[in-house]
Amino acid sequence: MTEAQLITAQDNYVDSLEGLTQLTGEPHFEVARLSESFVPDKLEQEELNYWINLAESSNPHLLAARQSINAFRHKIELNGAGHYPKLDLVAKYRTEESGGRFGDSDTDDASIGLELVFPIYKGGQVSSKVRSANLELNEARYQLTKTHRAVMREIRKSHRTVNTSLNRISARKRAVESADTALTMIKKSYQVGTRTSTDVLDAQREVFLAQRDYLADKYDYIINYLQLKNLIGTLVADDLEAMADWFEKN
């Protein structure tokens, strides 16, 4: 890593800590490192249909879109009820005080009864409201279809990305082992004079690069796994607490 790359990396690290401070409201000066012994296992359920079924029942965007459709259906029923007879319970109470030549008088008048109203014609107002609500219902159905397709695509992509991360981690681990073996052999050759110090430094550099890529893919796996859980709508605090065991305790 050149000096310029190192400066850029340090600046990105500080900016990430500032992002955590903004998110949590607490100052952060360092973060726990991922444990060197951490190697992710396969998904608890590898079948794509398992995650799709979870998303169908738990994804918040799909749930909201379905609730919107239900709301418009109720709105249509409510607007259509404008044609129906309306029965109300009506209660009235009146008190009146008056005075005159022959003295004051108090009058109390109380009544209770049923009032039945038959709408005859409202100038098309009810029909207009029903048509408007039907248009809104059709739009909500379209939005549900659009949202469903987008969510299903993201689920497939995220599921594929998690599995790709697992395969990459396995490949990176083999690359680290291969680089370590090559470095050991080159050091032995250097000791007997068949290799130069430059060869040793180059081999050491390959080891560092392989270790960096191996660790980066582990972090990518964690991010991709969190995104998958978030997409299906089942990401909870317990998931984050379980992941805390993957990191070294400060």
Image: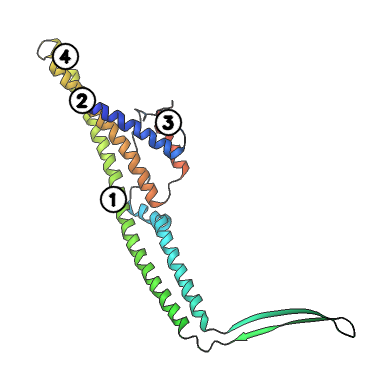
User: 11 or 228, which is in the foreground?
Assistant: 11
How far apart marks 1 and 2 lie (CA) works out to 35 Å
Q: Which residue is mark 3?
A: 28
Identify the residue shown where x is 16% and y is 14%: 188
| Residue lying farthest to the left in this orientation | 194
Q: Residues within 10 Å of mark 2 (few under 14, many from 20)?
A: few
Indicate the amino acid at tag 1. Answer: Lys
On screen, residue 188 above or below 130: above
Residue under circle 2?
Answer: 2
Q: How many marks?
A: 4
**Mark 4: which secondary structure?**
helix
- How far, Cα to Cα, is label 4 from label 1? 46 Å
Mark sitting earlier along the chain (4/1)? 1
- Mark 4 — residue? 188
Q: Amino acid at mark 4?
A: Lys
Q: Position of residue 163 (x, y in %)?
A: 29, 44
The secondary structure type at the circle numbered 3 is loop
Q: Nearer the viewer, mark 4 or mark 1?
A: 1
Residue neighbourhood size for the residue with mark 4, other residues' Cα within 10 Å, grouped as few (<14), some (14–19), many (≥20):
some
Q: In the current view of this chain or complex, which residue is farthest to the top?
A: 192
- Residue 216 locus on image (x, y percent): 28, 34
Q: Nearer the viewer, mark 1 or mark 2?
A: 2
Q: Residue at x 43, y 65 (%)?
A: 68
Question: Could you tell whether 120 is left or right of 4 in the image?
Answer: right
Q: Which residue corresponds to mark 1?
A: 157
State which tag comes first along the sequence, 3 or 4: 3
The amino acid at mark 3 is: His
- Please tell me in which quadrant of the rendered image residue 133 appears: bottom left
Measured Cα–Cα span from mark 2 to mark 4: 28 Å
Looking at the rendered structure, which numbered label has been put on residue 109? none
